[in-house]
Image (tube, coloured by chain):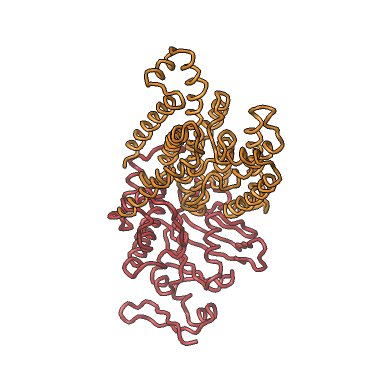
Chain colours: A red, B orange
């Protein structure tokens, strides 16, 4: 499923500057689309607009060509899986129980899990490498393990679109790469990924296209090679940087310089 | 522990506590006497003791204890606060203000129904005030504002109560304090029927909302993403939990500890899935309060110990034991 916005404007009550000010993006189905930008540039607001939990003041946000606002909550959750930046878990529950919550939008009010649900849960758990943790209490997991469990929950929704807000910010190299490889594989199976991240290097390596936000406006949009340039990044982040290419792999590499 | 094992244990405990609750008192009965009366036999005195006094009291204990534990579990999930208890929205303060006003004005002489009615009205007043405050901005209901409003309203009510007590004679103060410590003393078939008609359907609705409550306990944003009707579930379950609490406090006064600790004990034993947690909390609260009332009546017979004292005396060590066990396992 594709995601689109046209001249999207979102303004939070009591705020002077709109959080999003005329953002247009086109995310074709089956691609990884990375959204970058400094803190407060509107990345998370864009995610929330695509999930229908903030009011849109102008323009439109479309999922599969249909305005987000016209999707009902349950129908949306059947096709869009989302992982927010963080959640505080106050009560003990097992990893299995947590991942099984991803089946919520597919179940009737009093319906139990059937074989299909169990298969989806098993599959999600295996893909995120948390099978060994299934019976563990979520509150006792490390930050990285917990993050993988939350991604597994979103995958258990069997979504057509995955929206992730800085999913790898608390992960070590191995698990960060494992998640990005997982997203790559998901995209190959037809899922569309909207990835919000601060990781310029990995985004330019994994994303098909990138959107760079600055103060709620689009500063640059295009392929990684088009967006990851010294001029654009120095301007947007307000910090001198250099861009070169890794000799072994040819991937772009961003290095912050001295201020 | 498995869910079914805990359910069987709790049902057995509830039946045992009920039987003992009907047997013991100032006039002890045998199990045979009790069964005889229930089968329609027994002499007049026995019939009177069982049917007029002890059985309604046991049943009221079940309903109030179960309702408080269920409301506590619901508040804990919705407010995502392990310290939440049924009275957290100022409901006990409102009910107490109603009851204390009746006692201070001497209105209790009008009939036995005036006190519970005033307590219920006070509880409703607290609920309306707190929910109005939490939705005043016209935005979606914010549980943090709800919590704060509850604390502030409770503080205001307790100031009102302190003022009334300060200008009341010692006798009034004593009966007010006794009421605020909670008791099942006033149980009649009338109060049992009213509480049952009111509590049981409400409990059924909460238990039917168990699955969305599972999502809400993780966080409202996550619940949205997983397709829950967050605002609807929040409103319905908060109001129902508050009304169950109001009914409990109206017929039995303020009984602390049940609503806080029973859900946690159940969670430690079987986890946080509300499909199990809610019904088991109801059973656990019912068994716990029925047992506590039994002890309250027989411990210092003929005097009655306030039931809140017993719930804390028994509940605290039991809970600490459970907590230590689960800590050493983790």
**Residue in the image at 40% along x and 26% along y:** B19
Q: In the image shown, does B294 or A123 lie closer to the viewer? A: B294
Q: In the image shown, does A248 or B127 lie closer to the viewer? A: B127
Q: Position of residue A171 (x, y in %)?
A: 37, 67
Q: Is residue A193 above or below residue B88?
A: below
* Number of disc labels: 0
**Residue in the image at 54% along x and 77% along y:** A236
Q: Is residue A239 above or below residue A59?
A: below
Examine the rendering and report whether any part of residue B135 can be seen: no
Q: In the image shown, does B152 or A185 lie closer to the viewer? A: B152
Residue at the bottom extreme, as displayed: A258
Q: Position of residue B88 (x, y in %)?
A: 56, 48
Q: Is residue B108 above or below residue A82?
A: above
Q: In the image shown, does B59 or A149 lie closer to the viewer? A: B59
Q: Position of residue B41 (x, y in %)?
A: 43, 12
Examine the rendering and report whether any part of residue A74 can be seen: yes
Q: Is residue B298 above or below residue B177?
A: above
**Residue in the image at 57% along x and 55% along y:** B144
Q: Position of residue B214 (x, y in %)?
A: 45, 46
């Amino acid at each position: 499923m594709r995601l689109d916005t046209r001249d999207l404007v979102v303004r939070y009550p009591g705020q002077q500057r709109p959080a999003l000010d005329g953002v247009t993006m086109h995310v074709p189905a089956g691609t990884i689309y990375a959204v970058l930008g400094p803190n407060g540039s509107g990345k998370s607001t864009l995610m929330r607009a695509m999930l229908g939990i903030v009011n849109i003041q102008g323009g439109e946000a479309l999922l599969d060509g249909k305005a987000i606002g016209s999707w009902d909550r349950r129908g949306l959750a059947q096709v869009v899986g989302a992982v927010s930046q963080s959640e505080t878990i106050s009560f003990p529950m097992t990893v299995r129980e947590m991942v099984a919550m991803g089946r919520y939008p597919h179940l009737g009010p009093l319906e139990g899990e059937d074989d299909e649900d169990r298969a989806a849960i098993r599959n999600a758990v295996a893909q995120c490498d948390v099978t060994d943790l299934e019976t563990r209490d979520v509150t006792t997991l490390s930050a990285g393990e917990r993050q993988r469990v939350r991604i597994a929950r979103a995958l258990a929704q069997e979504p057509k679109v995955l929206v992730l807000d800085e999913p790898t910010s608390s992960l070590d190299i191995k698990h960060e790469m494992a998640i990005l490889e997982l997203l790559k594989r998901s995209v190959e199976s037809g899922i569309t990924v909207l990835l919000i991240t601060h990781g310029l290097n990995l985004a330019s390596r994994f994303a098909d296209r990138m959107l760079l936000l600055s103060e709620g406006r689009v500063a640059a949009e295009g392929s990684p090679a088009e967006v990851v340039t010294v001029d654009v990044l120095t301007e947007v982040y307000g910090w001198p940087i250099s861009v070169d290419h890794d000799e072994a792999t040819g991937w772009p590499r961003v290095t912050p310089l001295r201020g | 522990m498995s869910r079914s094992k805990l359910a069987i244990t709790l049902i057995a405990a509830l039946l045992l506590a009920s039987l003992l609750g009907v047997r013991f008192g100032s006039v002890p009965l045998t199990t045979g006497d009790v069964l005889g009366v229930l089968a329609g036999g027994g002499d007049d005195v026995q019939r009177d003791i069982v049917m007029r006094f002890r059985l309604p009291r046991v049943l009221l204990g079940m309903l109030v204890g179960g309702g408080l534990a269920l409301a506590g579990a619901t508040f804990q999930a919705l407010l995502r606060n392990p310290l939440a208890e049924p009275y957290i929205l100022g409901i006990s303060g409102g009910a107490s203000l109603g009851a204390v006003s009746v006692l201070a004005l001497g209105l209790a002489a009008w009939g036995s129904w005036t006190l519970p009615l005033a307590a219920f009205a006070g509880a409703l007043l607290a609920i309306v005030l707190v929910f109005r405050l939490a939705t005043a901005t016209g935005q979606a209901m914010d549980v943090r504002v709800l919590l704060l409003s509850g604390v502030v309203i409770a503080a205001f009510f307790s100031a009102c109560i302190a003022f009334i007590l300060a200008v009341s004679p010692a006798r009034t103060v004593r009966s007010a304090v006794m009421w605020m410590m909670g008791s099942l003393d006033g149980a009649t078939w009338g109060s049992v029927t009213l509480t049952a008609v009111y509590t049981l359907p409400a409990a059924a609705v909460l238990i039917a909302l168990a699955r969305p409550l599972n999502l809400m306990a993780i966080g409202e944003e996550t619940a949205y993403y997983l397709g829950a009707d967050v605002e609807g579930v929040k409103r319905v379950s908060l109001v129902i939990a508050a009304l169950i609490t109001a009914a409990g406090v109206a017929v039995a006064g303020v009984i602390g500890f049940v609503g806080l600790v029973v859900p946690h004990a159940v969670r430690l034993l079987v986890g946080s899935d509300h499909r199990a947690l809610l019904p088991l909390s109801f059973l656990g609260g019912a068994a716990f309060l029925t047992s506590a009332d039994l002890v309250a009546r027989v411990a210092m017979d003929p005097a009655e110990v306030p039931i809140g004292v017993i719930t804390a005396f028994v509940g605290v060590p039991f809970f600490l034991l459970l907590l230590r066990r689960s800590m050493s396992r983790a």
